[in-house]
Image (cartoon, rainbow, N blue to C red):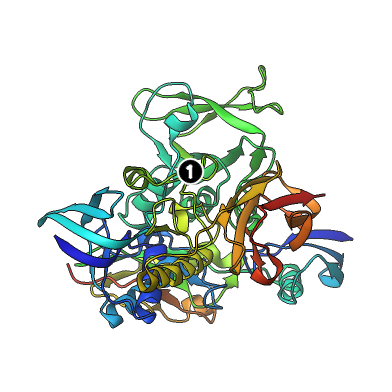
Amino acid sequence: MLKNFTCIMCPRGCSITAEVDGTRMVSAEGNFCPKGLEYVYQELTNPMRNIASSVLVEGGELPLASVRLSSPIPKDRIFDVMEEIKKVKLKAPVAMGQTVISDVLGLGCDVIATKNVGRA
Amino acid sequence: MRQIDTVIIGGGPAGLSAAVRLWEKGIRDILILEREHQLGGILRQCIHDGFGLTRFGETLSGPEYAQRFISQVEALGIPYVTDTTVIDITEDKKVTAASRNGMLEIQAKTVILTMGCRERTRGAISIPGERPAGVYTAGVAQSYINLQNKMVGREVVILGSGDIGMIMARRLTLEGAHVQAVFEVQPYASGLPRNILQCLDDYGIPLYLSHTVTEIRGKDRLESVVVSQVDDRLQPVKGTEKEYFCDTLILSVGLIPENELSLSAGVVLDERTKGAVVDEHHQTSVPGIFAAGNVLQVHDLVDFVSMEAEELADSVAAFLKEGELRSCSLAVKTDGNVTHTIPQRISGTKDFKLSLRVRRPMKDCRIRLLQGGQLVGERIMKKAIPAEMIQIPVKAAKLNEKEDLEVKVIC
């Protein structure tokens, strides 16, 4: 079966057409680089995404510190991870790169702060 | 009056990149003027990732991308002031700024315009109807949610398929809102394909092309919007109206370079880009005034903003050393398939990068750069879309100094 994919590995956003047999990629065309093949393989077996959100900061110059994941997670776990992120409250100061949740839900990646928030 | 070699108007990605590069080139008498309380510009609220792949070879969130440059500015000790709004620039490069500490008046040798852009609003696209609360531009909603911890609504409709609109569709969904649909008046999306996939498709949010909002209803708070299909002249088709009940309408209907200050300095603008007309040095029609980033042309990726500003800085350094830059008497002319180019003028003696966008989606096309019928540059594209800014490097060795440059798209 022929299936179309929009690669999200970079902003180029290649449209890839792949010949697919179940979760197996038989052939693919339209990808500019090898990452496109990796992406199609991943989409067929276990689609992964990174997400960004923010957490509350107490006593900070800003009410929120932005966060993201250190690496992508399975797409179907996005809302579970969002629930965990919503529970967090940090105390200022927050440093960019600081681990906010370590190994979130055992998924093998951390939630990390992406912004410095100084004390108010 | 205080004298400064280079005043940079705006401490977003373009201004910061230009400042760092200038410093590296030995230009130390710099001042960055920023109207917000912190440096970083719009990136401060763009908390999603995907920035930096071209410039840094890794994917970063907006605040992280900005911080790379802010940290450099801090480490190098490049002078900047925040909470300071520039209110006037003159043709002879006097810069006036207002802050809580009073007025600042500076005589600059060079001025770098990096003010970025602003969003088109409901007024700009003239949506009929009532005027309830609950109608936001995408960037304003983004600022409320990502900077101020204020949720904008629960039942959401989005008009316009710009990247920020799609990114906000995902952000609102993650924060518990229900995004019913994204409507786009054009027959193609105005944002990048990857955002259609990871911001809309992933969350089951439908994108309706050739549709627009034709009425806004609600007394105090938005209650519903009426959506209609449009024909090929973008006019609403009678009988296709459908009402969507919602408390929030997000507009992602385009960005406009913010050039009021440029105009006060006598800088000539390009009707097509709404930004300055510049030459291959990024110099505007006023010698010593330069422009880069979204104030010059709306970019798709911040990486290209930084790189454009870095090229600009090289020219500013040369201007300060030599007192003037080589004049650019050749025009860059386009056919109907191209919306605009940057630069608009060249000398024919210098390597440069030509930035452009196509007017409509095209397949298997060749973008050809010609001088007197001679091919001087070419880009062959399997698909070209308006959402993407296309950059083509041009070598001086191929150019002559006599003929205008023509840009043609052949399909």
- Drawn side of residue B343 relative to residue B317, left or right: right
- Drawn side of residue A116 relative to residue A34, left or right: left
Image position, residue B399 (x, y; %): 68, 64
Image position, residue B17 (x, y; %): 41, 70
Q: Which residue appears at 48% of the width and 56% of the height?
A: B174
Q: Looking at this view, is B227 or B191 the one in front?
A: B191
**The image quarter in which residue B31 lies:** bottom left
Subunit that carries the residue with mark 1: B
Q: Looking at this view, is B324 or B278 the one in front?
A: B324
- Drawn side of residue A33 relative to residue B258, left or right: right
Query: Is A96 placed above or below B44 here?
Result: below
Residue that mark 1 sits on: B274
For the N terminus of chain B, the quadrant is bottom left
Number of marks? 1
Q: Looking at this view, is A44 or B97 the one in front?
A: B97
Image position, residue B249 (x, y; %): 46, 37
**The image quarter in which residue A23 lies:** bottom right
Query: Is B158 placed above or below B321 here?
Result: above
Three-letter amino acid code at disc 1?
Answer: Lys
Q: Which residue appears at 41% of the width and 24% of the height?
A: B218
**Badge 1, how many Cα within 10 Å: few under 14, some, many 20+?**
some
Query: Is A41 placed above or below B339 here?
Result: below
- Secondary structure, mark 1, is loop
Image position, residue B327 (x, y; %): 50, 59
For residue A15, say whether it is visible. yes
For residue B343, say whether it is visible. no
- Drawn side of residue B82 relative to residue B194, left or right: left
Q: Which residue appears at 43% of the width and 60% of the height?
A: B46
- Considering every residue shown, the one lying at the far front of the view is B402
